[in-house]
Amino acid sequence: MDIIISGANGRMGRMLAETAKAAQSNGKPYHIAARVDISLETDPAAGTYAALEQFTGKADVVVDFSNHAATKKLTDYCLARSLPVVIATTGQTEEELALIRAAGAKIPIFLSANMSLGVALLADLVKKAVSVLPEAEIEILEHHHDQKLDVPSGTALLLAKRIAEARPDSPLVVGRHENGKRSPKEIGIHSLRYGSEVGTHEVILSMGNETVTLKHKAENRSLFAQGALAAAAFIIGKAPGLYDMRDIVG
Ligand SMILES: NC(=O)c1ccc[n+]([C@@H]2O[C@H](COP(=O)([O-])OP(=O)(O)OC[C@H]3O[C@@H](n4cnc5c(N)ncnc54)[C@H](O)[C@@H]3O)[C@@H](O)[C@H]2O)c1
C-alpha cells in the first residue's frame, strides 16, 4: 500500500511514518510513497515534498494530519487523482466541511477527529448513557498539550455530536464565561491546555444524586497512527462516500 502523508513533518505525521515502518518490518504491506509538508524541502530522492501537487508518483491513499486550512488543496489533489483519503486533521470550518462532503460524492473519504478504537467505544458508551439518563447535566472535559491549535478539540465536538443524536434539544456551551446557573439541558465543553498531554476526554453525567463519569486517556500518539493505517487499509477500494470509525468498529 503506497501512502502519501500530508503533514508529514508534524508530531502525528512523523509518528505515522515510524508506525508504518515498524509495521512493514513485521510484514505489513505499508510503504510511504511521499512525505508532504509545507515545512519540508522538495527532494524527490528523499521522498519529501513541500506541496501535494509536486508528487505525481504511484499512490494508493493519502493520510492527512496537517492543518484544516489545507482542506481545499487536499480535496482538489485527491479528486484530480481519484485517490481515497483519510482526513485525521481536526478544526475544519463549515466551508471546509462542505468541501469534504462534496468531494465525498466522488471519492471515498474517511473523516474522523479521533482514530482510536477506545474513543469510538467511548462515543458509543456516551450515547448509551445519555439515552439511559436523559435528564442528566452533561459536561465534557478535554485535556491536551499546550501546542494544540483547535479549541475545543475535534474529539470533544465528536462526543457532543453523539450526545445530540440521543438528546437533540441540548445547546452546546463552549467554556462558561458568564456568571449564573447552567441551563439543565446544556452540554458544557471545557478545554485544558498544558505540557505534553496527548489527549484525555471525560464526559460527566450528573443526576444530582448520582454521577457517572466516562473517560478515555491516550497514553501516546501511536494509537492514532495505528488507527489511521487501519483506516487507510479500510478505505482503499471503497465506493465514494464519507466513512468514519463507526464503519470500522460497527
Ligand atoms: N484524528 C486523530 O486521531 C488525531 C490525533 C492527533 C492529532 N490530530 C490532528 O491532526 C492534526 C495534526 O496534529 P499534529 O499534532 O501532528 O500537529 P503539528 O502541528 O505537530 O503538525 C502539523 C504539520 O502540518 C504541516 N502543515 C500545515 N499546513 C500544511 C499544509 N497546508 N500542507 C501540508 N502540511 C501542512 C505543518 O508544517 C506541521 O508539520 C491536527 O489537526 C490535530 O488536531 C488528529
Image (spheres, rainbow, N blue to C red):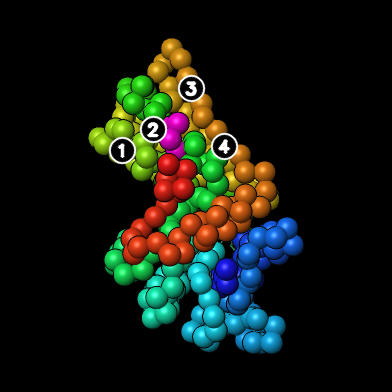
Identify the mark nearer the N-term, 2 or 1: 2
Q: Which residue is mark 3?
A: 212
Q: Label 2 sits on what residue type?
A: Lys
Inter-mark Cα distance, 1 to 4: 20 Å
Q: Magenta segment: does it hold 124?
A: yes
Work out which quarter of the rendered image holds the C terminus and state it: top left
Inter-mark Cα distance, 1 to 3: 19 Å
Identify the mark nearer the N-term, 2 or 3: 2
Q: Are marks 2 and 1 in contact (CB under 8 Å)?
A: yes
Inter-mark Cα distance, 2 to 4: 15 Å
Q: Which residue is mark 2?
A: 127
Q: Nearer the viewer, residue 118 or 184?
A: 118
Q: Residue at x 66, y 52 (%)?
A: 222
Work out which quarter of the rendered image holds the N terminus and state it: bottom right
Q: Are marks 2 and 4 in contact (CB under 8 Å)?
A: no
Q: Label 3 sits on what residue type?
A: Val
Q: Label 4 sits on what residue type?
A: His
Which structural element holds mark 1? helix
Q: Are marks 2 and 3 in contact (CB under 8 Å)?
A: no
Magenta part mainly helix, strand or loop?
helix
- Which percent across, then down, holds residue 229? 57, 58
Inter-mark Cα distance, 2 to 1: 8 Å
Q: Is residue 219 left or right of residue 137?
A: right
Q: Which residue is mark 4?
A: 216
- How packed mark 4 is, by other alpha carbons closer than 10 Å (few <14, some 14-19, many 20 or more), is some
Which structural element holds mark 2? helix
Q: Label 1 sits on what residue type?
A: Glu
- Which percent across, then down, holds residue 70? 45, 72
Identify the mark nearer the N-term, 2 or 4: 2
Residue 93 visible (yes or no): no
Magenta residues (range)? 123-127
Q: Residue at x 62, y 49 (%)?
A: 223
